Amino acid sequence: MIDFIRESLFSSAYRADIYKIISPAIGSTVYMVFFSSLFSIILGSILGIILYITQKDNILENKPINSIIGTVVNIGRSIPFVILMIAVFPLAKFIVGTSIGSTASIVPLTVAAVPFVARMIETSLNELDKGVIEASVSMGASEAEIITKVMIPEAAPSIISSITITIINIIGYSAMAGTIGGGGLGDVCIRYGYQRSRTDILIYSVIIMIVMVQVIQCIGNFFVRKTDKR
């Protein structure tokens, strides 16, 4: 351990080697997490809102649509990510032209996260006071106005908290994607940390991912406090 610390602190060649290996992986992980989070939050939020407004006694009650979307979401959530990623390889190849690499990994990461986001958004909206929505209806607000000006603002703290959890989960998913050709820090951990017995690379990669999670959580907590009206 002492030799490891001494080498880390005083060997410029060692530091350059670490940087050369890890820095591209950090960029790949951030790239995967950013775009898969963006797409999954957009698509998942739409599905989550539809699940909520089509519930019984809600503004656009529709039991068949609610049941169909709910079933699809439940199926998506029940499939382990590694299996889902392999199953989605053909779709990734169709969309981006390849089934390996960081860009290709965005497709299964998004597909895996969308059902999770949908349920989280639905749960956040279920916490709303139904009286607020009923008051908006009685005042003549349209469905679109109720969704954009009442439901989403009122549920904003819970929605932001759900989005924060989603992004953190996607960071974990991205590491698993790296183990089967997805690139990023997961790939580095397998190729260097495990296959080449580079414990140092493994440690640095884990530390970086912990830092990423902590940064996302802190940002999420900040916006939750900003939007909380209580």
Image (spheres, rainbow, N blue to C red):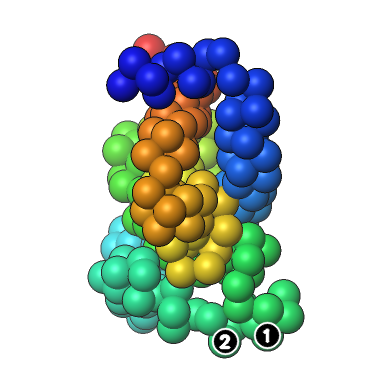
From the viewer's perspective, is 20 left or right of 211? Answer: right
Q: Quadrant of the N terminus?
A: top left
Distance from the alpha carbon under mark 2 to that under mark 1: 6 Å
Res. 55 visible in picture: yes
At horizontal 43% and vertical 62% (from top left) the residue drawn is 179
Asked if disc 2 and disc 1 are in contact, CB closer than 8 Å, the reply is yes
Residue underneath mark 2: 90
Quadrant of residue 39 within the rendered picture: bottom right
The residue depicted at 34 percent of the width and 16 percent of the height is 2
Q: Would residue 47 be seen by someone viewing this image from the given angle?
A: no
Which of the image's four quarters has the C terminus? top left
Q: Is residue 172 above or below residue 5?
A: below
- Please give the name of the residue rendered at 73% of the width and 80% of the height, measured from the top-left corner: 97
Q: Which residue is mark 1?
A: 94
Pick the front one: 93 or 75: 93
Q: Secondary structure at mark 1?
A: helix
Q: Position of residue 129 (x, y in %)?
A: 32, 35
